[in-house]
Amino acid sequence: MNAKPRKGEGQRYLDCAHYESCLDVAGLQNWKTWNCESCEIFRVFFGTSNMTEQKEEIKRLCEECHEKPTITSKHRYCASCMAHMAHEKKKAANHTPKPETSQPRPDSTLTIDFTDHASLLTEIKDLATQEVRTPSQQVIYVLKAYLTSHKPS
């Protein structure tokens, strides 16, 4: 059975396994309201006699947009606003902020001129590539390794 939401007011089957995907469809289509009444799954569970009783129950307006009725009288938001909030939440979860880089202190920067030592710079770059580092990181690594091995006892 395929879930098929329909635009307009009507009954919804909140416990349906397809409810969330139907909610997404309603939100993406920007429907003010939607229902499950044209869906095969809904008909299997509710038939057609229960629809008019349930329609009377939904009269509360969405707390977000203040225009559309909520999904049920117990919910705070309409289908469109819920889908929009879910979309924003997914978008925020997928967005990883870039870490803030601190500004170097004036006394923590060293510039090295390799003009007279081009072969040494080539060796550093080759090592950096092999060890998956930038050339600057490789220079620091080599200096640290040297200083560690030559500590005075």
Image (tube, rainbow, N blue to C red):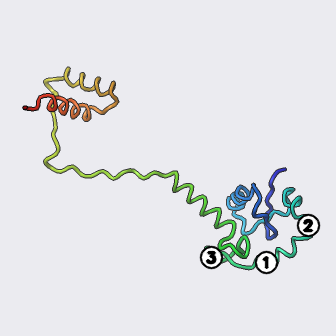
In this rendering, which labeled residue sits more in front, label 2 or label 3? 2
Residue visible at 83% across and 74% down? 54
Residue furthest top as drawn: 119
Distance from disc 2 to disc 3, alpha carbons, whole Å, reads 30 Å
Q: Answer with the quarter of the image where residue 32 lies.
A: bottom right
Answer with left or right where residue 122 lies relative to residue 113: right
Label 2 CA crowd tier, 10 Å (few <14, some 14–19, many 20+) = few
Residue denoted by label 3:
63
Q: In x, y percent, where is residue 125? A: 27, 26
Q: In x, y percent, where is residue 80? A: 67, 66
Residue denoted by label 2:
48
Mark 1 element type = helix
Query: 82 or 120, which is in the foreground?
Result: 82
Q: Is residue 4 above or below residue 57?
A: above
In this rendering, which labeled residue sits more in front, label 1 or label 3? 1
Distance from disc 2 to disc 1, alpha carbons, whole Å, reads 16 Å
Q: What residue type is labelled 1?
A: Glu
Q: Quadrant of the C terminus?
A: top left
Label 1 CA crowd tier, 10 Å (few <14, some 14–19, many 20+) = few
Distance from disc 1 to disc 3, alpha carbons, whole Å, reads 17 Å
Q: What residue type is labelled 3?
A: Glu
Answer with left or right where residue 134 lies relative to residue 56: left
Mark number displayed over residue 57: 1
Mark 3 element type = loop
